[in-house]
């Protein structure tokens, strides 16, 4: 049976539900970021009181423009490594959506910093949940853990964070967790920096500005690109449905697309330059979404239409 919360989301309505007390208060770490800001926006539309904690290292104030003045929203400019602050801000929360982290490239360049900002931060977030009696935590992990055999510093840091969350929750079984492993999320507000951004917005930015398309490797590597809207729905469903307690889910679409196919879709007339593969890159990067689909969850696989809409959005917001 499909949960009522999921039915409401799948049927296209952001239905405001009546909740009382702690159940209506949520914290989103990294809420000024690409995925986090979309999550904050949707949670507010569903009637939650939302506190965002973000140090704006990669997040942006402009990502929160549509809801920054919402009376049910509170923004805290701080790092999630500040343990005392986390305890204070978590004290009334019913759910913590832990979205904060680092990008892939930064993790490969600075492994120690990756462990500090991902793994150590996970320990502090989890312990702050325990000390503040937060009953629920949803952790944004990544498919880069490669089912326990990561090939990158990013994947190693995230896997270590997953393991620490599981271990600490064993000592405090009343703290319920769900781990969501994201696969190549794309959508509006995504970072298009040529060094640290996502491949889709980078390609679109190059197309808009008539720049050379750069592909690392021969372009035959494949990805399951996943709409940010699906990632947000998965987070909210797991936050609102007890059946997901203690589970780990791959959040990925059914569409498998190669990088060279992506380049042709976005910029068919632009020249392409091939560089060597980056450290930590893999040829086939995809997950198994059957566990979420078994709950009735559906993914948006209309990739071409979504890319067209995203291109139009980026053109509008660049001008």
Image (tube, grey):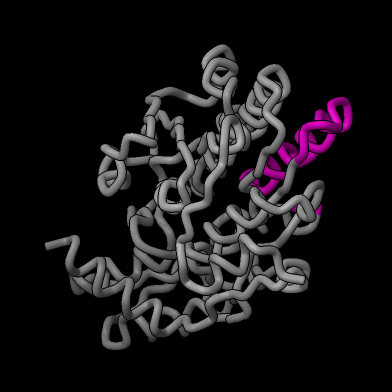
Question: Which quadrant of the view contains residue 159?
Answer: top right
Please determine whether, in this image, residue 193 is positioned above or below residue 216: above
Which region shows up in magenta? 148-176
Q: Nearer the viewer, residue 184 or 294?
A: 294
Q: Quadrant of the N terminus?
A: bottom right
Which residue sits at x=52%, y=51%? 17
Asked whether, in this view, residue 202 is left or right of residue 259, the answer is: left
Determine which quarter of the picture holds residue 24: top right
User: Whole-percent x and y of residue 164?
Assistant: 78, 33
Total numbered labels placed on residues in the image: 0
Does residue 319 appear left or right of residue 144 in this picture? left
Q: Position of residue 99 (x, y in %)?
A: 54, 43
| Residue drawn where x is 38% and y is 77% of the image | 307
Q: Is residue 250 left or right of residue 185?
A: right
Which residue is farthest left?
319
Q: Residue at x 70, y 73 (%)?
A: 296
**Whether residue 149 can be seen here:** no
Residue occupying the point 32% across, 87% down: 268
């Amino acid at each position: 049976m499909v949960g009522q919360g999921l039915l409401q989301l799948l049927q296209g309505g952001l239905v405001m539900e009546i909740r009382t007390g702690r159940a209506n208060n949520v914290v989103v770490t990294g809420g000024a970021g690409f995925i986090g800001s979309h999550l904050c926006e949707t949670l507010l539309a569903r009637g939650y009181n939302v506190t965002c904690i973000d140090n704006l290292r990669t997040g942006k104030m402009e990502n929160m423009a549509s809801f920054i003045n919402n009376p049910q929203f509170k923004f805290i400019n701080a790092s999630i490594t500040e343990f005392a602050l986390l305890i204070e801000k978590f004290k009334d929360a019913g759910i913590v959506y832990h979205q904060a982290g680092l990008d892939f490239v930064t993790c490969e360049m600075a492994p120690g910093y990756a462990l500090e900002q991902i793994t150590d931060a996970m320990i502090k977030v989890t312990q702050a949940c325990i000390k503040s009696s937060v009953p629920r935590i949803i952790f944004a992990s990544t498919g880069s853990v490669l089912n326990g055999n990561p090939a990158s510093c990013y994947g190693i840091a995230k896997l270590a964070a997953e393991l620490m969350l599981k271990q600490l929750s064993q000592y405090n079984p009343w703290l319920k967790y769900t781990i969501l492993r994201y696969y190549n999320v794309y959508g509006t507000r995504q970072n298009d920096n040529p060094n640290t951004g996502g491949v889709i917005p980078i390609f679109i930015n190059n197309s808009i500005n008539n720049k050379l398309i750069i592909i690392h490797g021969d372009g035959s590597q494949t990805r399951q690109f996943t709409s940010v809207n699906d990632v947000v729905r998965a987070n909210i469903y797991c936050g609102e449905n007890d059946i997901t307690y203690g589970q780990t889910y791959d959040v990925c679409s059914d569409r498998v697309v190669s990088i060279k196919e992506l380049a042709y879709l976005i910029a068919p007339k632009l020249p392409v330059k091939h560089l060597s593969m980056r450290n930590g890159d893999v040829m086939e990067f995809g997950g198994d979404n059957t566990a979420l689909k078994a709950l009735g969850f559906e993914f948006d696989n209309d990739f071409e239409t979504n890319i067209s809409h995203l291109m139009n959005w980026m053109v509008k917001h660049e001008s």
